[in-house]
Amino acid sequence: MVFHLFIPIITPMIGGALAVLFNRQRVVARAIALISVLINLGYGLWLMSVVPATGPLVAQGSGWLAPFGISLVADGMSALMVMLAALLMLTTIIYSFYSIDEQREHHFYYPLLLLLLLGVSGAFLTGDLFNLYVWFEVLLVASFGLITLGGSRDQLEGGLKYVVLNLLGSTAFLAGCGLVYGFAGTLNMAHIAERMATLANPGLQTVLAGILLFAFGSKAAIVPLFFWLPSSYHTPPVAVTAIFSGLMTKVGVYALYRTFGLLFQNELATYGPWIILLAGLTMVIGVLGAVAQMNVRRILSFHIISQIGYSVMGLGLASAAGLAAGLVFTAHVMIVKMALFFIGGAAEQIYGTGDLKKMGGLARREPLLALFWFLGILSLAGIPPLSGFIGKLILLQVGVSQQAYLITAVAAGTSILTFFSMLKIWNEVFWKKSYDDVNRLPRVPLGLLAPGAALVVLSVALGLLAGPLVDYNAIAGQQAFDRNVYITAVCGADGCEAVYRAALK
Amino acid sequence: MHRNELPPPNRLPSRSTPRDSALYDSLILRTVSRLMMPLLLLLSIYMLLRGHNLPGGGFIGGLLAASAIILQIVAFGPKTARRILPVNYLLLAAFGVFFGAIWGLPAMVAGLPYMQAFWLPEPIPGVGKLGTPVLFDIGVYLTVIGVTTKIALLLVEEPILFPLPAMKPSPVETEDGA
Amino acid sequence: MIILLAIAIGALFGGATYLVLRRSVVKLILGLILLSHGVNLLIFTMGDGVRRGAPPLIDASGQPPAGAADPLVQALILTAIVISFGFIAFVLALAYRSNQAAGSDDLDDLSTTDRL
């Protein structure tokens, strides 16, 4: 029992409340947001340093016994995600200092960011299925606020689609939760996993897994369920799009990993090929969707979908190594994708438009911005020695070693398409001659450049020093795929059923 | 009866002139809602305090109190309702979250999981057992009042927070600017 | 009882699906409301009192207390109701605002963000 495991949840909750209370004092609200995120980041780093050695850390809400109360579990995957969420939120907040207008700040921009962090951290840490639903709703409500904050026509239209389709996904998740409870008689994830292994009726299990696949798939924007993403992500301010790209879909991916790695691991044999198929379609359709677009952020939005395909491919490979490879890739893409949004957004901000036709010639004007953009797209495409290379290499290695040649080939081919699509932005924004005089444009302030640059540097560092990341994720993948480790950590060596029976006596 | 044929409302709580936009102009509703307000607030506090081992609790209590305030909005209009209870509901909600969250912290200082309960050894006569869960419930109570009333006020007043380009920007008429 | 509930849930889901597929935003939202009711009823059906006949509670003698219902599903439904209450309020306000902005209730007119 680790009583301080609640810190990543309490900090943004109290911080968010304080930020609302001190909203009038802009500096105070900003400072509160910054401090909360730094606390979370520090705690996440500490978790990452501890968890591989000790195994999953567990805390019980209010001290209620494990299968009855709500558990918080931090295994390798959770710790990595909590840390990344805080890190990405930190860069977003710094970027927001320089890019968000005063009116949005006045209308509770920073509290909404903290609410988002609260929901995301809670979703990563919880060990209870219904609690996961609640955290999903928390982060959804924050994202609803962020995506419509500002209330322009585009935002309202995009927001409406985003809200409605996400609510449908949430409803499916809720129905799945209820059915799982009806089937297994418990909501504690460890206990569900244990009972799923013993309860007969494989047909029902397949149906339940299918419902949850639909629910989380719509959150993660895999192929038939992605339409909300490209029609809404380009409407809010750049900082909001960036943090959405880094966190929202990845929570869906995390939930898929958790569902199929822990709860319905038996079903992974049934669903594995289908998940692989969906992953392949997601990669290709996402990247092809980007071809027709002529707007920086819309192109990047379609690429989010394409990259989700790789993360889901790791799950479809149905092995600890596959999950580990998927985690490495997800960590890489969270960082690089946000960096690209920051840099592309900075270019958009100085031009005042994201339309590729109206931009151009920025490479000479802003060489640093161009350099970091170029490094970013190299990393996204998977050119060595950047982090994207490592992420894709490991995925492809696992794919080949498991004889999944087709998906491996698709994944490799999609990388090339990704690079072409990114080069389009490079050509249009940075390389081609501008129709206007570029020198009239405002310079990029350091605050808009620094967050993206820092993330690109991180990507380079992760590529050059990939060893620790890969080793960490190998352990994390094993922990995520080994149900006994999780169950033992939550309920003790005898398992949840023993605790349950002992309590009934 | 047409609105303008009503008797001059000199004995009613001072209504702003020109008339505050009551949603439903009825003498019976106005009289009843004035009488009901203290009763409902009292009932809400009763519900709040019995909540930890009987049906009730912060959420139900908060909804009751909010319905008392919303009744005022319906009967007298938002301006009068704001004058009767001059509270910034959004800040009330935020304070409720803060207040509810901090009472889980003493357990963490003692090395126990967040929100582990501490109780006073003896029940207080007339109130019942008191402990950190009751304080947490008070936080919930304040949050629910704040959020529910704020939603109702926003729906009634329709402040234009972010004017559309086509719209004429009109000054927001809420005292908390939200 | 369970057959009746199953029919009711099916009717709610069916009606919700029909409404969600309408082009009008208002009907879409009515569909969402109906859907959340359907799911709440579904969770209610999953309670042991309805499905297996006895809740997972026992008194000192090891027997389920007479007339007790499964409290967990009620807690789940209460939570779900609160959440959907907040979301429906938000969606209604959003639809109202987007109607002001776009001047239309028809989803076909709300496609500016999907155009190239």
Image (cartoon, rainbow, N blue to C red):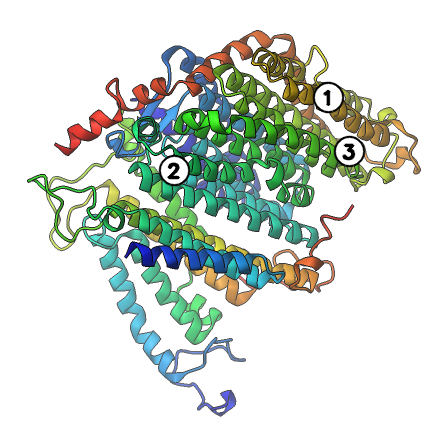
Residue B69, given in percent of the width and then of the height, sits at: 38, 66
**x 24%, y 27%: residue:** A497
User: Going from the N terminus, do you reach mark 3 or mark 1 first?
Assistant: 3
In the rendered image, the quadrant that contains the N terminus of chain A is top left
Observer-side mark, 2 or 3, equals 2
> What is the secondary structure assignment of the residue under circle 2?
helix
Residue A337, given in percent of the width and then of the height, sits at: 66, 28
In the rendered structure, which amino acid carries the disc numbered 1?
A: Gly
User: Residue A204: which disc?
Assistant: 2
* Residue C10 visible somewhere in the drawing: yes
**x 44%, y 75%: residue:** B76
Q: Are marks 3 and 1 on the same chain?
A: yes
- In this rendered view, identify the residue nearer to me: A265 or C101: A265
Residue A505, given in percent of the width and then of the height, sits at: 12, 32
User: Residue A347: which disc?
Assistant: 3
Q: Which residue is mark 1?
A: A413
Does residue C15 appear left or right of residue B167 in this picture? left
